[in-house]
Amino acid sequence: MKAIVIGVFGGPEVLILREVQERSPRNHEVLVRVHATSVNPVDCSGRRGERAVPLPAILGCDVSGVVESIGAEVEDFIPGDEVFYMPETDSGSGSYAEYHVARAGIVARKPSELSHAEAAGVPLAAGTAWEGLVRRAALQPGETLLVHGSGPVALFAAQIASAAGAQVFMTAASGTTAPGNGIGATRVIDRATEDFVRVIRNESSDGAVDVVFDASGDTPLDRSTRVLKEHGRMVSTTKPPGAVPEESILRNITHHFVHAEPERARLDMLRTLLQRKQLIPIIDSIYPVWEVAAAHRLVESGTPYGTVILQVVANDGPGTRTPLSLQPLDWLAHAGSLFQRQVQQ
């Protein structure tokens, strides 16, 4: 099969199309034909060598596709089923490939209402938001949430909180505040021109929030803690600057750091929200998979609003909100020339 492989750490230019050995599914595994995947910041950090990735590696933390074949003891799926999931990527066998083998226990049925491009942006980002808000922070109806960030995890967090009956404030970079008002946020705070501490104190019902969900990693912990109520909860998807302030101990504030792991049950719960239209994947752009380097550069620029998708199978059927005005992916036509060009670079 064809896959995008890194043999060394470095810039986007190290992402190279190669022929790799396709593996048959074992007893409890399924082989999935990948229709779409996504580019997440964690993929970029893995490519740069900032996290433990065994080389050579195939990156990619999201799959939406169709079951091609199943292991002898798989009972939940049959070939032809549409599925989505977050791969177990510690082995360096991610989703930037034509096919992917996964444990059947982490695979979930794709919502029929979504295209593969839409579904490919859900597992990692929405799963992280769900893990942080529902399991760690135990967000309750009527509570108030402040979300830092405007990337895919933050956008899903705002929608999940709104569906749970919480009041949502968001901080976001200039240019992303207007769209944010359409995804469940009561108020989107422009970080360039507004002080979120002052806004929360003036505009939230109690002058503080019950939960802070930090998906940006660039807001000092002491400032986030300043807007939390006593017994408030702080959830971070990445390490924010600064030490945990002593004030957290005195006010019984709990801190949670979230790293979502592959799990079918969480995707089944998210599918319910997706089917009810309480959760909507927001796609920034769609690239054919052979343009993965350009997609990585876009994600690293910090400018996307929503998820950057890699389309592996171009004919995705109805339902794609972002028009796919790209040439169809023909591996046979592109593999030889692309591989030669990248080797020469």
Image (spheres, rainbow, N blue to C red):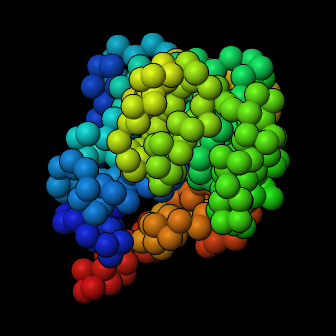
Q: Horizontally, is 165 left or right of 283 in the view?
A: right
Q: Residue at x 81, y 49 (%)?
A: 181
Image quadrant of residue 162? top right
Regarding residue 115, the answer to whether it shows in the image is no
Please say if 269 is above or below 112: above
Regarding residue 132, the answer to whether it shows in the image is yes
Residue 90 in the image, given as x and y percentages of width and height: 26, 39
* Quadrant the C terminus occupies: bottom left
Considering depth in this image, is 145 or 308 the residue closer to the camera? 145
Q: Residue at x 22, y 65 (%)?
A: 9
Please say if 72 is above or below 273: above
Image quadrant of residue 57? bottom left
Residue 106 in the image, given as x and y percentages of width and height: 43, 25
Considering depth in this image, is 307 or 213 the residue closer to the camera? 213
Considering depth in this image, is 69 or 220 the residue closer to the camera? 220
Q: Horizontally, is 36 left or right of 279 in the view?
A: left
Residue 158 in the image, given as x and y percentages of width and height: 69, 38
Residue 308 in the image, given as x and y percentages of width and height: 57, 59
Q: Residue at x 66, y 66 (%)?
A: 192
Q: Horizontally, is 257 left or right of 134 in the view?
A: left
Image quadrant of residue 2? bottom left
* Quadrant the N terminus occupies: bottom left
Please say if 76 is above or below 206: above
Q: Residue at x 42, y 23 (%)?
A: 249
